[in-house]
Image (cartoon, grey):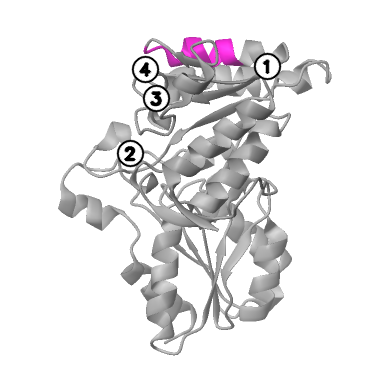
Amino acid sequence: MREVQFREALREAMSEEMRRDENVYLMGEEVAEYNGAYKASQGMLDEFGARRVIDTPISELGFAGIGIGSAMNGLRPIIEFMTFNFSLVAIDQVINGAAKMMSMSGGQFTVPIVFRGPTASAGMLSSQHSQAFESWYANCPGLKVIVPSNPADAKGLLKAAIRDNDPVIFMESEQMYGDKGMIPDGEYLLPIGVAEVKKTGTDVTIVSFGKMMKIALKAAEELAKENINAEVIDLRTVRPIDYKTIIESVRKTNRLVIVEESWPLGSIATEVAFKVQKDAFDYLDAPIKRVMGGDVPLPYAPTLIEAYLPNPTRVIKAVKEVMYL
């Protein structure tokens, strides 16, 4: 095991897959000469050259479409969006092109492409650069959507995404690129669609993913000081969702709190809550609680950002409510 930054884990995953398969390439704004907007591709241009690490104009619609076309013709592109907020310019290509191509072609074309970059809030970036897009893309059949919470998962899941024959949305956090964590030595892949129980417990289940896992784990740590033993599950993938792991946990703890940064309506938390009440209703001893971002565009002011985002205090309050404390 060794300690690396989140951005380093991403770079290792991309570089290892590019060494393994000459059909893999990276394309996006500033990925080459500038070494990546967040330095996730640092040194890759020197190793792989300008034919495989490709700088683009500010033209998400264009380079997303080029990536999809190349994937249909045998390549395996990694398309970096500087932020998924900018992917809205290319969403027609992602949804109407990549996601639907295998179905529309009757299986004649696959689109083995990875769209990756940061999602959700990242400090004082205001409304147009702070949106959480996980539930947007997870709503579309034909896509797989991954949201890792730590460097080890980021590397193992990104390698799996690059090898997958379906289009994959790989969502990171600008605020996590500098996070450090231990990763295994040697090559490893993690299965897409499998959640991980990060902490076992008996009193309540807390489900989250991405950078909100920090909030969930911090809340569980504080709850333990009050002898409340929370089980914490990291979804890791939000399409497909590993319902089995969640339901097995709820059958043990009988209570569920879901933590997610996005807007409440049509969220991943909404879908998880529906599935649990459908398949594990008789095991619930309290209504399911969600701890969500505010139902407003994210403001710029730090005080309003703090009020908008989930935090450990809000999670602890929700846990105590489902435990009737």
Of the pair 58 and 130, the residue shown nearer to us? 58
4 vs 3, front mark: 4
Give the structural element (helix, strand or loop) at label 3.
Answer: helix
Among numbered discs 2 and 4, the one appearing first in the sequence? 4
Q: Is residue 197 visible?
A: yes
Tag 1 near tag 4, CB within 8 Å? no
Return the disc, 2 or 1, that comes first in the chain's sequence.
1
Amino acid found under the numbered disc labelled 3: Phe
**Marks 1 and 2: in contact by CB < 8 Å?**
no
The residue under the point 53% across, 38% down is 12
**Which quarter of the picture shows residue 102?**
top right
* Position in image of residue 48 (x %, y %): 53, 19
- The residue wearing badge 1 is 75
Measured as percent of width and height from the top left, residue 174 is found at: 36, 41
Residue type at mark 1? Leu
Viewer-closest of 91 and 108: 108
**What distance separates the C-alpha of mark 1 from that of mark 4?**
22 Å
Please say if 270 is above or below 109.
Answer: below
**Total marks placed:** 4
Q: Position of residue 261 (x, y in %)?
A: 40, 51
**Residue that carries the numbered disc 4 in the rendered image:** 33
The residue identified by callout 3 is 86
Q: Which residues are magenta?
A: 58-67
Q: Nearer the viewer, mark 1 or mark 4?
A: 4
Instruction: Sort mark 1 into few (<14), some (14-19) or many (20+) by Cα contacts within 10 Å.
Output: some
| Residue, disc 2 | 130
Q: CA distance from mark 1 to mark 3?
A: 24 Å
